[in-house]
Image: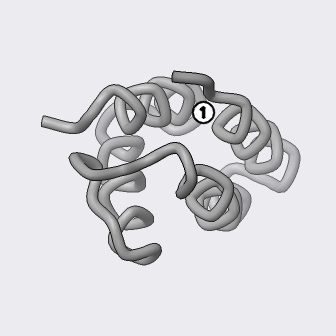
Amino acid sequence: MANKLAQEVEKILSVAVGDFIAKATVKKNCELIGTTPDTLTPDKLPELAEKIEKSVSFFSGKEVGSGVAEKIKAIKI
């Protein structure tokens, strides 16, 4: 089970790409920055947002990607 932070990231992402892809994207991008959805910490959010922005931009366009990244960076938990 992903922690609260990862759940928030998934919620933001699912609006843009759907639930299934959001979950997979969070998992893969957490691995790329050396963490997991269970151990994601607030200090990793900017790095995670950057990786996710690239993924989402590739599939859904740059505007969607940067919007998602900004929302992820703004998460406060």
Looking at the rendering, which quadrant does residue 67 occupy? Answer: top right
| Residue drawn at x 39%, y 51% as measured from the top left | 26
User: From the image, which quarter does the N terminus lie in?
Assistant: top left
Looking at the rendering, which quadrant does residue 23 occupy? Answer: top left
| Residue drawn at x 87%, y 45% as measured from the top left | 63
Q: Residue furthest left?
A: 1
| Element carrying mark 1 | helix
Tag 1 residue:
16
Check disc 1 and give the amino acid type.
Ala
* Residue 49 horizontal/vertical position (percent): 64, 53
Tell me if residue 30 comes above or below residue 64 in the rendering.
below
Mark 1 surroundings: few (<14), some (14-19) or many (≥20) residues within 10 A: some
| Residue drawn at x 51%, y 22% as measured from the top left | 77
For this rendering, which residue is in front, 19 or 10? 10
Q: Give left or right: position of 19 versus 64.
A: left
Q: Give left or right: position of 27 versus 58.
A: left
